[in-house]
Image (cartoon, rainbow, N blue to C red):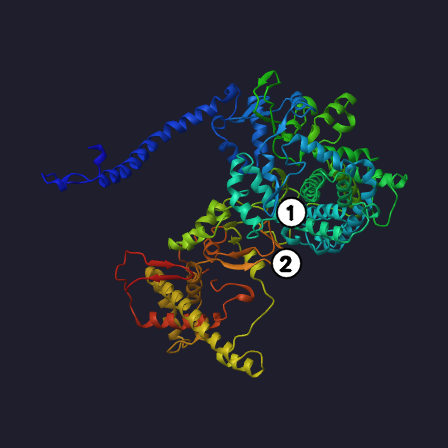
Amino acid sequence: MYLLSGVHHTVNHDSDAIPKRSDIIMAIIISFPVAALHSAVYAVPPLFLLYLALNYFYNSLNIFPGPFWAHLTDVWRYIDVKGRRPELTHIALHRKYGDIVRLGPRTLSFADPKATKVIYGLNKGFTKSEFYPVQMTVSKGEPLPSLFSTLDETFHANLRRSVNHAFSMSSLVQYEPMVDETTEIFLDQTSRLFADGSTVCDFARWLQFFAFDVIGSITYSKRHGFIEKNEDIDGIVSSLANIFDYSAPVGQMPWLDKLFWKNPIFDLLQKLGLSDNSHPVAIFAKHRMEERMSAKVDITGSKDDLLTMFLKAGESRPDFMTNKRILTMAVSMAFAGSETTAISIAAVFYYLLKNPECMTRVKQELDDAVDNGTIVNRPTGLVSWTESRQLPYLDACIKEAFRMHPAAGLPLERVVPASGVEISGHLIPGGTIVGCSPWVIHRREDIFGPDANVYNPDRWLTAPPDQIKAMDGMMLQFGAGSRTCIGKNISLMEIYKIIPSFLRRFEVQLAHPDQEWKLWNACLFFSPLRKVPGPFLARFSRFWELNAIRRNDLNETYIRLHEKYGHKAFSRILNPLAADLRLHALGPVVRIAPNRYSFNTPEALKTIYTSNENPKSEPFLAKLMDLKLKGRIDQGSIFSSCGSNIIAGSDTTAITLSAAFYYIYQNPIVLKKLRDEIDAHERAGLLSNPAGFTEAQQMPYLQGIIKETLRMHPAVAQMLPREVPKNGVVLNGYHFPEKTQVGISAWALHYNPELIDSPREFRPQRSGFGGGSRVCLGKNISLPEMAKAIPEVVRYFNIRFEKPGQPWELDVGWFTWSSYKC
C-alpha cells in the first residue's frame, strides 16, 4: 500500500485493474521526495540546536565569559559591528568580564597587556584570520593579496623583504619633497577656499583629500587631484568608505564574502570581460604603471617614488615581484596609506580644538621654535619632519590622539597555531581566533594611568621613563609584530608635517564647540563620515520604495519614516568637525533607496530647490509663440509643452480641488466661517458673480483654506528628487557625493510636528508646488482656478457625503488621487 500512496485504483477482477509497473515507479518517484521532505523538515530544528550546542561548547571555550548569543553564533558579532560602534561594546565587555571575553563561538578578545606579546610576538606561529581576505582587492576577477590581506606568512615575508627598502628611513628623505609640494598646495587651497571665514570647512573630508593626494604623489609622482578640484575624484573616497562599511561586518562571518563580493560567478564574469568591479584606485594605479612601463625609461635613473621602488624590486627579483604584485603594492598604498593617516590627523586636530589649553601650548611651542631657530621661518609656513620631531609637546599631543583614537577600530585578529598556546594563564586551543582591540588596550589604567579615558598629553612628558616605555610598547595604532604597518614612517612624516605647518598658517575653531563629533567604526575608524538612517532594504534596492507605492501608502510611509528616523532621532547638528553653512538644526534625513535620500526640513528645501530666477506669469501659448518667433523653440516644442501642460495641470488641480472640498465639508466650522466671509464680501461689494481671482486673493480665510489643503494633501506623493551637483553638498550634517539623488517629501515636511502644531488637524491658517527653478510652471494657473472655484461652489451648493462617517479612499502613486461620493 505504501508504494501506491497517492495513486487511486478501482479494484475489480479484470486484469487491467492490476497496477502497471510504470504506475508503481511513478508512485515511488512521487512518494519518496515527499517523505524525504517531511523528514528533512522535522530534522531541521534538532540539527540547528545541535549546531548551536557544538558552537557553545566548541573547544571548551564556554568557560570564558561573554554575551550569551556570542557563545552560539557569529551573527552576534556581525550585528554589533554593523551598528558601527563595536569598540564601545568591547570596552564595556572587558570592564564587565575582565581580561578575556568570548566574542564568538571561536573568537576570544584579550585585554591583558601581556597577551599582546604572545599574540603578536615574532615567530609565535600565529597567522591572520579569515577577516583580512575580505578586504582583498579584486581586479578583473583576480584577487590581489597584499601585505595586509594575505594569510600566507611565507608570501608575506617574501613580499615584505622585496619592498622593505622603499619604506626605510633613508628612502623617506626622498619622499619629503613630494609631501612638501602637496602640503603647500593644500595650505594655499585652504586659504583660498576657507580662510575668509565665509565657508565652514568639512575638515575631516578635506583632510582625506590631502592624505589621498599625498600618497598619490609619493606612490606615482602624480596626485589624484582631490585638493585642486576640491571634489571626490572618480568617487574614490566614497567607494573606499563603502568597502570598509561592507568588509567590517562581513569580516565577522567571512564566508558571506564568497556569496556577496567574491562570488565565483562574479569573478568569472569579470574574467570574461562582462563585468568589472575594479576599484577606481586599482584603475588609477594600473594606468600609472602602464605609463611608466610604456615610457621605457631607465628605472635606475628615474624619480624615486614608491612605484619606481617597486619596479626596481621587480627587476632584482623578477621571479617573485611580478607585475601583478607590483600593481598590488601600488593599490594597497592608496587603501592603507590614505584613510588611516586622514583619520589620525583629524583626531589630532579634534582633540586640540576640544582642549584649548593644549592648542595654546602647541602654538606657543611652535612660536618659540621659530624664535630660537629650531624651525626655519619659511614663507610657506612649512615645517620639516626633522624640525617637528624636536617639538616634545606636539609629539605628546599626537601620541595622545593616537592613544585616544586609534585608526583601527576592531581587534587585530590572529589564529592560534594548531598545537595551542598559553595566553593569560589559559591554554587556548589551536584554531581559536584571538586578538586585542587597540581601543581596549589603550585605556588600560595600569599602563596609562588612572585618567586613561581623558586626553592628557602630559602623561607622555611627566611619567617615569619605564612607564613611558611600557606605554609605547602597548600602542597598537599601527598594529604589532611582523604585521606592523609597513608604511608607518610615511604616515608619521605626513602627520608630523601637516599639523605644525597648518597651525602656523591658520587659526582653527570648531563651528559648534559644545558638540561632540559623530563616529563611524568600519574596520578603520572614520570620523566623521556618517550613514543616513532608513529601512534596511532601502540600502540595497529601490524595490523597497516601489513596494511602498504598491501598498498605496507612499505618502504615509514618508511621514512614518521621518517620525522614526528624522525629528525624533536628530535634534541638533551632529558633527561640528564636519560642519557646513548648509547644515540644518533639525537634521531629519531618511534613506529611501541606495542612492536616494528624503528630507523634511525647510532649510533642506531651500538648499535643494533654491533658484535665483524669478519667472513672470504670462499667457502660456502666447509666451510659447513669442519664443518660436524669436527662434528659441520649434513647433514640436510648442506641441509637447501644451500637451504636458494639459496632463500636469489637470490632475494636480483636480486632486487639490477635491481635497479642498473634502476638508471644507468634513469640517462644519470651517464651512460656516468660509460662508460668512463670502457673505461679508458680497455685502461690501468686494465679490463679483462669478468671483474674480483678485477678489478671492483679498479673502484671508479662503486663502487659508487653500494653503491648508495644499499642506494637508500635496498632489504629489513621491519625493521631488534632485541630483547632487559636482563637488557634492552637505545637507543636515551629511555629505552627499555627486549624483546622489536627494529631495523633499512634501508629505513628510508638511506633517513635521516640529514645524507645524497638530499637523494632522485641518486648520486654515497655515506649499504644494515643488520648489526652486523647477517649481510647477502652472502654479499661477492652478491657484486662480482654486480661488475662483471654491467660493462659487460653496456659495451655491450644499453638499453632503454619501457616507458621512466613512473616510475618503486614496490612490497613491506619483499623484495622490482621492475618491469620495457626495
Q: CA distance from mark 2 to mark 1?
A: 18 Å
Three-letter amino acid code at disc 1? Ala
The answer to whether residue 729 shows anywhere in this view is yes
- How many labels sit on residues? 2
In this view, the residue in front, 692 or 317, is: 317
Residues marked 2 and 1 touching at CB (< 8 Å): no
Q: Sort mark 2 into few (<14), some (14-19) or many (20+) by Cα contacts within 10 Å.
A: few
> Where is the C terminus found, in terms of image quarters?
bottom left
- Left or right of 176: which side holds 554? left
Where 719 falls versus 328 (above or below)? below
User: Which residue matches tag 1?
Assistant: 578
Mark toward the viewer: 2 or 1: 2
- Between 6 and 306, the one nearer to me in the picture: 6
Image coords of residue 455 (percent x, y): 69, 32
In the rendered image, the residue lying farthest to the left is 13
Image position of 621 with respect to 743: above or below: below
Left or right of residue 180: residue 333: left
| Nearer the observer, 332 or 12 | 12
* Position above or below: 584 against 32: below
Looking at numbered disc 2 in the image, what kind of residue is underneath it? Answer: Lys
The label on residue 397 is none
Residue 698 appears anywhere in the view? no
Mark sitting on residue 726? 2
Residue 329 quadrant: top right
